Image (cartoon, rainbow, N blue to C red):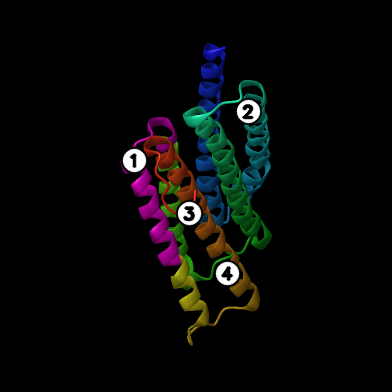
């Protein structure tokens, strides 16, 4: 029975790694769609989010079966419960990438972001992509230095998020009402993407060290 349980846990870990790879692909393509006004890429991100949703459902079902059939305790229980939490965070990150693509699609062929904020969103996109790459690495290696790098990437996203609000509230803002809405939403999507990445990083840190750091 123990061998079966360990095989199920390995399959769960592999599924989370696959899911993180899909999220990395989604946020990378969402940034391309936003910055380059690429309609085909935006449509692909929106369509591909279904694969992330389906994988979350499969992993959640696996976790529930493990809880019901194996009744794990201690470290094993933490691993299964963490699997549920991580899959939920990754699924939400996929949704946020889809939301970014939907904004890009909705404004096509125009840019959703006004020219004077383009560089800010280029930097936000780069930070989100780096964070997603590190998530893939973290789920594979459980390297706590990578978890710390994810937190640093999130700090940058928070700073850039604040920059967009300063621009919106500044006296020099000359954008339309629609641009103000789009900038607010897009900035929030990127900021929340980072927050969910941190949630995954802290959950992995908890698995490795047994110590809770902030909200997991």
50 sits to left or right of 22: right
Count the marks: how many?
4
Quarter of the image that includes the N terminus: top right
Q: Residue at image x 51%, y 36%?
A: 21
User: Which numbered disc covers residue 144?
Assistant: 1
* Residue 88 image offset from top left, x and y in percent: 60, 43
Residue 131 position in % (x across, y down): 42, 48
- Classify 74 as above or below 188: above
What is the chief secondary structure element of the magenta stretch?
helix
Which of 152 and 201 lies nearest the eye of the viewer? 201
Mark closer to the chain start, 4 or 3:
4
Q: Which mark is residue 184?
A: 4
The label nearer to you, 3 versus 1, is: 1
Looking at the rendered structure, the secondary structure element under dot 3 is helix
Image spot of residue 75 (x, y percent): 47, 30
Residue span colored magenta:
138-160
First in sequence, mark 2 or 3: give its number: 2
Between 33 and 215, the one lying in front of the other is 215
Q: Separation of disc 1 and disc 4 at Cα?
A: 33 Å
Q: Which mark is residue 44?
A: none
């Amino acid at each position: 029975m123990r061998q079966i349980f360990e095989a199920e846990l390995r399959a769960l870990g592999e599924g989370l790694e696959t899911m993180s790879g899909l999220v990395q692909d989604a946020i990378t393509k969402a940034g391309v769609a936003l910055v380059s006004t690429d309609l085909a890429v935006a449509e692909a991100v929106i369509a591909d989010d279904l694969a992330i949703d389906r994988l979350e459902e499969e992993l959640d079902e696996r976790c529930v079966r493990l809880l019901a059939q194996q009744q794990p305790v201690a470290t094993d229980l933490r691993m299964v419960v963490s699997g549920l939490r991580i899959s939920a965070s990754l699924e939400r990150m996929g949704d946020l990438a889809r939301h970014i693509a939907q904004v890009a699609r909705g404004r096509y062929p125009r840019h959703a972001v006004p020219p004077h904020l383009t560089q800010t969103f280029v930097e936000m996109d780069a930070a989100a992509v780096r964070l997603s790459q590190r998530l893939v690495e973290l789920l594979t290696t459980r390297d706590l230095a990578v978890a710390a790098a994810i937190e640093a990437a999130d700090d940058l996203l928070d700073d850039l998020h604040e920059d967009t609000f300063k621009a919106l509230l500044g006296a020099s803002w000359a954008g339309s009402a629609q641009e103000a809405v789009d900038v607010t939403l897009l900035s929030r999507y990127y900021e929340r993407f980072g927050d969910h990445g941190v949630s995954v990083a802290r959950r992995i840190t908890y698995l490795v060290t047994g110590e809770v750091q902030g909200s997991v």
